[in-house]
Image (cartoon, coloured by chain):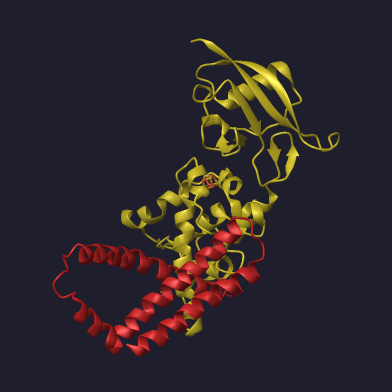
Amino acid sequence: MGTRQIELEVMRYNPEKDEAPWFQQYSVPCEEDWAILDALIYVKDNLDSTLSYRWSCHMMVCGSCGMTVNGEPHLTCKTFIRDLPDKVRVEPLENFPIERDLVVVLDDVMQKLQLAKPYIIRKDDPPPEDEEYPQSRAALKKFKQYTMCINCMLCYSACPQYGLSNDFIGPAALSLAHRYNLDSRDQGKAQRLDILADHDGVWECSFVGACSEACPKNVDPAAAIQQMKVDGTMEWWKQKFGLTGDKP
Amino acid sequence: MTIARKALVWGLFAAGGTLTSFVFPSLIALFLLIASGNTPVGLEYGQIHAFAASWMGKASLFGVIFLALWHAAHRLRVAAHDLGLRVDGLVASVLYLVAALGSALAVYYLVLI
Ligand code: SF4
């Protein structure tokens, strides 16, 4: 297999030294089957050990190698050299503060994931011992897609609303909440909607759909958010008429 | 916390969108059919007029017009925001006012039929 010389243009930023981010060029001899992540690893191992970036699994599971490649959010482990031109620009994920080089600060979205109450909520808490809550295959199918999220945050990077206002709870957290709302064992939908259908929740979404296009796991957060808008509207009417919105 | 009033705004928006996506293509199809001299049976002028003159007809026509206007107003408001116009209060007031005015005119003309 041949190699191809790729000009990598990498954004660098060291908050202790640099006033602003800048670009550094590296010429990298890439194998045909390499992904951008491999090229970055090559740089770190052979050309410049000061380059910082996150990665772990190299197989689309850990969700930590998200970066902006030629202007679009991608997992660098699944963005292949063979699909790219000879010049490739690599930047950190957009819409997040830069920690250093290609590493971004994710504290904000980590907090937002908590808002989703991403666990099964039962009224009979703690649940009776020796009892199980069985779930049919059909019931699982309803939300399985939303369990595929790997928290890579490409969707936040793609989302224009999150770019405008960091108060927006955002795609991954909302679709995570939807995953539990749709779970037949869960009874916490009304609780979640109280938070997620409030001002900075689902209504901030203007259904651009960029999140679903960016998602490497086909989660479709945009669909989840629209479905939650319907749920939120029903819940609003229920609250108006003094009915509780909880599942029996 | 409780669910924001935005639920109401969005609910009307969604209802308007769903409704217009069915009603407007049918209206265009009907227009083309009638214009080409193929008026469908039961949809002649007299019959449609009679429908519009009945209270049921007036109510349904008002529903369609009001929801369509609301939908358009809200869509434009969101589009303005997406396009970088950051005076939401003003944009919203103007657009909803236009929608309200249109709805009021619809009532006026429907009552006249
Ligand atoms: S929804 Fe998709 S893009 Fe967003 S964090 Fe999860 S896997 Fe990543």
> Can the viewer see residue A180 in this picture?
no
Q: Position of residue A64 (x, y in %)?
A: 60, 38
Is residue B3 toward the left or the right of residue A12 in the image?
left
Q: Position of residue A82 (x, y in %)?
A: 50, 22
Residue farthest left in this picture: B41
Asked if residue A192 is positioned above or below residue A106 in the image, the reply reads below
Chain B's colour is: red
Q: Position of residue B83 (x, y in %)?
A: 60, 55
Which quadrant of the figure contains the C terminus of chain A? bottom left
At a point 55% along the width and 77% down the height, the residue shown is B97
At a point 70% along the width and 37% down the height, the residue shown is A103
Asked if residue A150 is positioned above or below residue A223 in the image, the reply reads above
Residue farthest right in this picture: A17
Quarter-of-image position of residue A152: top right
> Can the viewer see residue A36 in this picture?
yes
Asked if residue B14 is positioned above or below residue B58 in the image, the reply reads above
State the residue in front, A134 or B53. Answer: B53
Q: Position of residue A125 (x, y in %)?
A: 52, 69
**Number of labelled discs?**
0
State the residue in front, A163 or B36. Answer: B36
At a point 55% along the width and 23% down the height, the residue shown is A85
Chain A's colour is: yellow
At a point 55% along the width and 53% down the height, the residue shown is A171
